[in-house]
Image (spheres, helix red, strand yellow):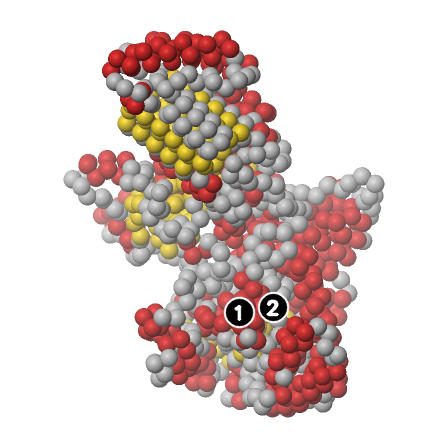
């Protein structure tokens, strides 16, 4: 009974087509509360060990998690007993589920840097909710245009859609596109009577635009920095300035910002980083970064002869795009799936990485999988160099990828559309097994396991049916955190700095603005 | 149906083309009184469907383009028709350009000065006969998300377009083999970056490389001994071309502003669907065609002037900032390739001039709806059978259905229904102020507003437009009856109290005369009016005792007894207007 209930609930959260703003808010609130609760419990649990290395970090925290689980399970049980039968139904509904954690169970090892989503299986109140991770559970992204504020400018709306479909993806691309769209929105703005542009524009016109973008996908660090800069610029405008002048001024400033902080910066970084590539180098890179692409192209144009290895992973396959454009430019490119990393890293002489954000403790936040690349490179004594504009530097601190991350909808891990009929009958099973094996790497293990039990056709599951598995929740993180020890150097427009200098650059670049 | 919230404006304007409706000429022969766009489809003027569709997308800037003849009735209807006035939002603007004839092509229409002036930004072109269950914003969403240039709207004019094609087959009760189709060749558009969420139309979006109506296709086939010539360049560029012949253009185009100039530049273009889109699609792969059509100047010229205007010429380097170039899900286009080895000198001047970076023609996308009965309906109504089948389809929708087309009331509360009358609720639609006599049997039918139906009437699969009068004992199967037509039954029609006396008397007289006439030929049974699969024109009077199958009944038909009807027509019309 509990299982079915859980499934129904899950499918509800997954398939809910329209989410109103109010609901989103509610959900965010609930999430926050859950997070707080989790934090409180965390304080009780053994303090988190600052991880020396990625591998070493996993175990203690997993243990901590286990201890915590037990404590909580007991607490929950005790609570359940204390409750003086509030209402029969409620009590019955809750108890079997709460009894769950006391049963012995294996906590799957937390593989932070795995390319596919780590699946967490821990029955709790809502069967699949893990308190420790509950702050990460995906807030529904806007699936369509319903519920968008009326004030949103068409350009911003279009951008929001493009961001949510990953047509525009990548920290700097999103930042530039956002600023250009804001330019449009600001030009379309007229100040109402009785107020002035500096007082009204930000709170009444710009914030719905920002909210719209945020509801399409959480804002990137660079976008946050740019928005902060823009707000400051607007607020500090002279209120007596005529409106059109003020708008033109803002737009010019935006252009200048894009120019200075991104266009020229990219060139400067590429010019500096290309010197790291020498004749005969083998450069390894992961996914796609605009700066890394530029650096490599410039080094190629300079006449340096070198080889390139592009490592790539699901679900976005950004490395494919990088490999394509570099191949078109005439470079020698080797394209390797993530599973081949350990093999190719031995050949590499240099690892070039892009960044989503540089955190203040010197850690790198980048596309999920980057940390493994850096770890492997570190082990093989290959220098890891990060290219990152200062606009992506952040004042935040994160020790691991669980504290701070963006979670994408789990459906995005699928490679093919969800079949309309779930293949439960044996005839359908055979076909899905074949296609699944060739395409869906993650489920191949499950398939081979199930294939041996052919007499029970209903047991076969592919990734498509994950939501029908009770106690399972998929997390599809976008980023992971690479420890500073693996990073040899960060190249930004202020020069080549060690990761420990990130806070300094951040203060210089983003806070003094 | 009220809209819960106003969606944000997508920054588009809509042009709804209210054409003449040639294939519906039984009902639209006089556009000055009843233009095609006001024909009722399931008791709503046809125009309501595209208007409502636009409103649901958040488009309120709507221009109706119509020939001057049809403008007055259209404006009157917009002011007074209860269904049209119930639409929220500002009333659409009616534009009747001077040069527009009933026979003008759609591209010709785009070239007219008034229309050119009316188009101020990106626009959607719709036809008034477009009916869609699919939410417009979902289609628009695809257009927006696959148009990288959109985000920086004034920056670059390299936006693409999006058309919609629906399958004509595979839809029971609606599809028929006679449906018009188009010939569409498409190539897959780049794969989505991740699995699109459920309900997204992304899987159906493809890039059009060739499109023409089936008529043109047949002409081409005839010219070429039943072979369709296809250029090698197409296959050289696209390895995977899919040709469909059973899809039809829904005549919904999301077009960027530059298409206006493109249409204006090419005088030869006649229709939007065949010429503007057809050439645009071809220009994407055929060498030199884009230049021949002036696309390079349309795109480039536009661009430079706009940039100057937007930037004020102060910071020109920013032209190069392109968010899509930075995006991690795109690869850079092939850099300006050197032309393949130069030709031998003998070829001389005929060599192509060293190509400037090849003109990138913005893609023309199309949403190809998969053929499946579970898909939401998209249709165009341009023949009488389609009008009937679609009306009946809408009548079948349950009132609580999520479909935007469903009616709130299957049988309007203001309808008066006599005793022992049976109406099958689930597939009938009865509009306001309908009176139905006793012992009637109505199945799978749509009855328009203010209809009067006598007693003992049997209607099956019939569509009655507004104000139709059906006499006692009439049997109709699969008929479409035009506005204010009169189908006489065995006895006089004007039994109802409250009807104008003069008219009632006249009708009685006539009915009696008829009875006498028919009494000679046979018994009572023959007296009944039986119509099967007939189309009856507006204001036409079908005399009692008529038995017909598959006929089209229009005034001025050379069939003898028409002379008498003419007076009748006028009388009825006048009287009804007074009411």
Vertical position of residue B328 compared to residue A41: above or below: above
Label at residue A138: 2
Q: Chain of mark 1?
A: A
Residue drawn at point x = 33 percent, y = 23 percent: B529
Q: Quadrant of the C terminus of chain B?
A: top right
Q: Quadrant of the N terminus of chain B?
A: top right
Vertical position of residue B38 compared to residue A185: above or below: above
Picture coordinates of residue A208, whole percent (x, y)? 69, 52
Residue B520's image quarter? top left
Residue drawn at point x = 71 percent, y = 70 percent: A32
Instruction: Give the labeled residue for mark 1.
Output: A410
Q: Dot 1, crowdedness within 10 Å: few (<14), some or many (≥20)? A: some
Q: Nearer the viewer, residue B490 or A129?
A: B490
Residue drawn at point x = 67 percent, y = 76 percent: A91
Vertical position of residue A116 compared to residue A22: above or below: below
Q: Nearer the viewer, residue A229 or B239?
A: B239
State the SS at label 2: loop
Query: Which callout, 1 or 2, points at the residue further toward the start of the chain?
Result: 2
Vertical position of residue A182 compared to residue A383: above or below: above
Picture coordinates of residue B208, whole percent (x, y)? 37, 48
Residue B545's image quarter? top left
Q: Dot 2, crowdedness within 10 Å: few (<14), some or many (≥20)? A: some
């Amino acid at each position: 009974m509990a299982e079915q209930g859980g499934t129904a609930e899950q499918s509800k959260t997954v398939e809910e087509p329209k989410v109103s703003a109010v609901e989103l808010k509610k959900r965010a609130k609930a999430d926050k509360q859950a997070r707080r609760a989790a934090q409180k419990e965390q304080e009780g649990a053994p303090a988190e060990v600052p991880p020396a290395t990625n591998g070493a970090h996993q175990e203690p925290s997993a243990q901590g998690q286990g201890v915590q689980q037990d404590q909580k399970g007991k607490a929950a049980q005790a609570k359940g007993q204390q409750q003086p039968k509030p209402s029969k139904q409620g009590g019955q509904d809750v108890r079997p589920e709460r009894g769950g954690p006391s049963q012995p169970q294996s906590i799957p090892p937390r593989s932070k840097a795995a390319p596919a989503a780590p699946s967490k299986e821990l029955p709790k109140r809502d069967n699949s909710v893990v308190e420790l991770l509950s702050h990460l559970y995906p807030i529904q992204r806007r699936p369509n245009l319903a519920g968008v504020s009326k004030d949103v400018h068409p350009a911003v709306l279009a951008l929001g859609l493009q961001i949510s479909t990953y047509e525009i993806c990548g920290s700097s691309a999103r930042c530039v596109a956002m600023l250009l769209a804001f330019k449009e929105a600001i030009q379309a703005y007229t100040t109402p009577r009785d107020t002035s542009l500096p007082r009204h524009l930000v709170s009444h016109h710009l914030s719905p635009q920002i909210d719209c973008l945020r509801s399409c996908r959480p804002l990137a660090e660079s976008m946050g920095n740019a928005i902060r800069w823009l707000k400051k610029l607007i607020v500090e405008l002279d209120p007596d300035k005529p409106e059109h002048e003020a708008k033109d001024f803002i737009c010019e400033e935006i252009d200048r910002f894009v120019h200075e902080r991104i266009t020229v910066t990219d060139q400067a970084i590429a010019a500096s980083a290309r010197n790291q590539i020498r004749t005969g180098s083998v450069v390894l890179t992961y996914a796609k970064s605009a700066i890394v692409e530029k650096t490599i192209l410039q080094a190629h144009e300079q006449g340096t002869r070198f080889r390139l290895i592009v490592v790539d992973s699901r679900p976005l396959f950004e490395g494919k795009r990088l490999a394509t454009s570099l191949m078109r430019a005439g470079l020698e490119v080797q394209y390797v799936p993530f599973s081949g990393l350990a093999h190719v890293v031995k050949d590499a002489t240099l690892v070039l990485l892009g960044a989503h954000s540089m955190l203040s403790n010197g850690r790198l936040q980048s596309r999920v999988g980057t940390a493994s690349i850096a770890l492997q490179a570190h082990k093989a004594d290959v220098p890891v160099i990060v290219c990152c504009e200062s606009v992506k530097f952040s004042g935040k601190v994160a020790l691991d990828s669980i504290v701070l991350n963006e979670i994408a909808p789990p459906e995005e891990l699928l490679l093919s559309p969800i079949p309309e009929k779930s293949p439960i009958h044996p005839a359908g099973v055979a076909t899905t097994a074949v296609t699944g094996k060739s395409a869906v790497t993650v489920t191949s293990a499950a398939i081979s396991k199930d294939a041996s039990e052919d007499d029970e056709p209903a047991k076969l599951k592919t990734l498509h049916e994950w939501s029908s598995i009770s106690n399972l929740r998929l997390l599809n993180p976008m980023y992971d955190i690479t420890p500073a020890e693996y990073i040899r150097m960060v190249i930004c427009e202020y020069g080549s700095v060690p990761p420990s200098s990130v806070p300094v650059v951040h203060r210089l670049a983003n806070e003094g603005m | 149906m009220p809209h819960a919230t106003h969606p944000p404006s997508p920054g588009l304007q809509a042009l709804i083309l209210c054409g003449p409706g040639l294939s519906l000429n039984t009902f639209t022969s006089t556009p000055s009184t009843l233009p095609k766009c006001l024909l009722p489809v399931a008791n709503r003027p046809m125009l309501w469907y595209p208007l409502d569709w636009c409103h649901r997308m958040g488009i309120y800037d709507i221009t109706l383009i119509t020939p001057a003849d049809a403008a007055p009735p259209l404006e009157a209807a917009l002011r007074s028709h209860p269904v049209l006035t119930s639409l929220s939002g500002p009333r659409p603007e009616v534009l009747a350009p001077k040069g527009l004839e009933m026979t003008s092509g759609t591209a010709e229409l785009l070239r007219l000065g008034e229309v050119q002036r009316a188009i101020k930004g990106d626009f959607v072109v719709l036809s008034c006969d477009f009916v869609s269950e699919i939410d417009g914003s979902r289609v628009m969403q695809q257009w927006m998300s696959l148009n990288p240039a959109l985000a920086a709207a004034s920056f670059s004019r390299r936006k693409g377009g999006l058309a919609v094609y629906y399958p004509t087959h595979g839809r029971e009760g609606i599809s028929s083999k006679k449906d018009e189709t188009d010939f569409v060749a498409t190539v897959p558009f780049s794969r989505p970056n991740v699995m699109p969420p459920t309900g997204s139309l992304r899987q159906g979006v493809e890039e059009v490389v060739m499109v023409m109506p089936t008529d043109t296709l047949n002409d081409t086939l005839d010219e070429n001994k039943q072979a369709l010539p296809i250029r090698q360049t197409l296959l050289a560029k696209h390895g995977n071309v899919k040709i469909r012949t059973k899809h039809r253009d829904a005549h919904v185009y999301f077009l960027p502003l530059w298409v206006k100039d493109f249409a204006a530049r090419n005088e030869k273009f006649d229709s939007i669907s065949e010429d503007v889109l057809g050439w645009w699609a071809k220009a994407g792969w055929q060498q030199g065609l884009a230049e021949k059509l002036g696309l390079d100047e349309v795109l480039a010229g536009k661009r430079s002037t706009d940039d100057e205007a937007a930037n004020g010429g102060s910071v020109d380097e920013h032209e190069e900032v392109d968010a899509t170039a930075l995006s991690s899900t795109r690869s850079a286009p092939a850099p300006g390739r050197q032309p393949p080895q130069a030709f031998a000198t003998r070829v001389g001047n005929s060599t192509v001039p060293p190509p400037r970076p090849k003109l990138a023609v913005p893609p023309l996308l199309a949403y190809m709806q998969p053929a499946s009965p579970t898909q939401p309906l998209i249709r165009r109504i341009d023949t009488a059978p389609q009008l009937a089948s679609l009306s009946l389809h809408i009548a079948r929708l349950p009132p609580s259905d999520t479909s935007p087309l469903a009616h709130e009331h299957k049988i309007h509360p203001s309808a008066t229904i006599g005793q022992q009358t049976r109406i099958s609720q689930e597939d009938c639609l009865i509009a306001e102020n309908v009176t139905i006599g006793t012992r009637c049997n109505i199945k799978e039918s749509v009855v328009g507003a203010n209809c009067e139906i006598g007693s003992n009437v049997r209607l099956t699969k019939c569509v009655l437009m507004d104000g139709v009068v059906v006499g006692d004992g009439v049997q109709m199967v699969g008929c479409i009856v035009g506005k204010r037509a009169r189908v006489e039954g065995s006895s006089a029609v004007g039994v109802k109290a409250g009807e104008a006396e003069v008219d009632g008397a006249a009708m009685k007289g006539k009915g009696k005369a008829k009875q006498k006439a028919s009494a000679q030929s046979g018994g009572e049974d023959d007296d009944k009016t039986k119509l099967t699969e007939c189309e009856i024109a507006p204001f036409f009077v079908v005399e009692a005792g008529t038995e017909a199958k598959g006929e089209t009944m229009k005034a001025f038909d050379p069939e003898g007894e028409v002379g008498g009807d003419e007076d009748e027509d006028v009388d009825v019309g006048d009287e009804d207007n007074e009411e």
